[in-house]
Image (tube, rainbow, N blue to C red):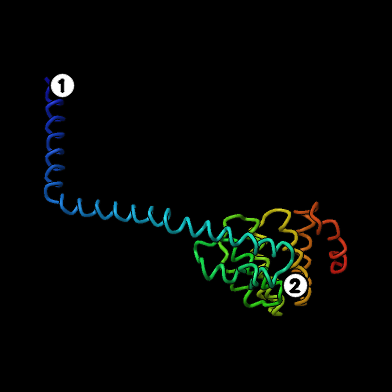
Amino acid sequence: MAKENTEKAREQAAAEAMSKTDQFFKENGKKISIIACCAIVITLGILGYERFIRAPKVAEYRAKAFLAENAFKAGEYEKAFAGDAEIIGFEELIENYGSAADKSAWMYAGVCQLQLGNYESAIAYLKKYNGKDPILAARALACIGDAYVGLNELKEALVWYDKAAAKADNMFAATYLFKAGIVCEELGDNAAALDYYKKIKDQYPQSIEGYDIDKYISRIDK
């Protein structure tokens, strides 16, 4: 008997739930239909944009960026950045393609400007680089530090070298720590410089900087 009552209670609860659900859809069916239609339109719009507008622009960008990348690799930084009669440089590629341009475009442009001594422009481009690869991201941060050194803003440079070292967390970090140490020496803070050098010795002894770091430690720690 108790079992039958339990089954009836479940059936009644289920019936009430179904009734409430049915009532909800009767009262809100029009709103739900409108929302569903809007969602479909938005989804189709996004898919259409990606396929018919953005994807072709990305392909076009990559085809044109190839020549600028080759100029960069050859050390022709002015040509890679500004272009010439033969190629479109990263400056124009970024202007023309915007978000369709590969994230590395901002990195290329920033490094070109850094190499050309246009430090403020280099910083502006490099700060817009948002690639997810930790090695390249750390490199971009370190290049910002280099640009601030070029502007003789050493304290600001130190901030960016610290960020680069924290981001890298590998052998490349030794390079950024070493640059930070040199900057600290230039600022007259030998104690901070010594901390950076000892960190290289302790954490990255197999790095290029690690092989000669004792020379820099002994120069300060006398």
Seen in the picture, residue 97 relative to 149 is either above or below; the reply is above
Give the left or right position of residue 212, taking residue 55 as reference.
Answer: right
Query: Which residue sits furthest front?
Result: 85
Q: Secondary structure at mark 1?
A: helix
Q: Earlier in the sequence, mark 2 or mark 1?
A: 1
Question: Camera-side residue: 196 or 191?
Answer: 196
Give the left or right position of residue 155, taking residue 205 as reference.
Answer: left
Question: Camera-side residue: 16 or 70?
Answer: 70
Q: How far across and down, in percent of the image, does residue 222 sit?
A: 88, 68
Marks 2 and 1, Cα distance to the nearest angstrom?
82 Å
* Residue assigned mark 1: 3
Where is the N terminus found, in terms of image quarters? top left
In the image, what residue occupies the spot 59% across and 73% down?
124
Q: Is residue 174 visible?
A: yes
Check residue 183 in the rendering and tell me which mark sits there, or answer none. Answer: 2
Q: How far across and down, in percent of the image, does residue 4 sit?
A: 12, 22
Looking at the image, do the residues carrying marks 2 and 1 touch, with CB atoms under 8 Å apart?
no
Q: Amino acid at mark 2?
A: Val
Give the left or right position of residue 58, taking residue 90 as reference.
Answer: left
Query: Which residue sits furthest bottom?
Result: 152
Quick one: label 2, few (<14), some, or many (20+) residues within 10 Å?
A: many
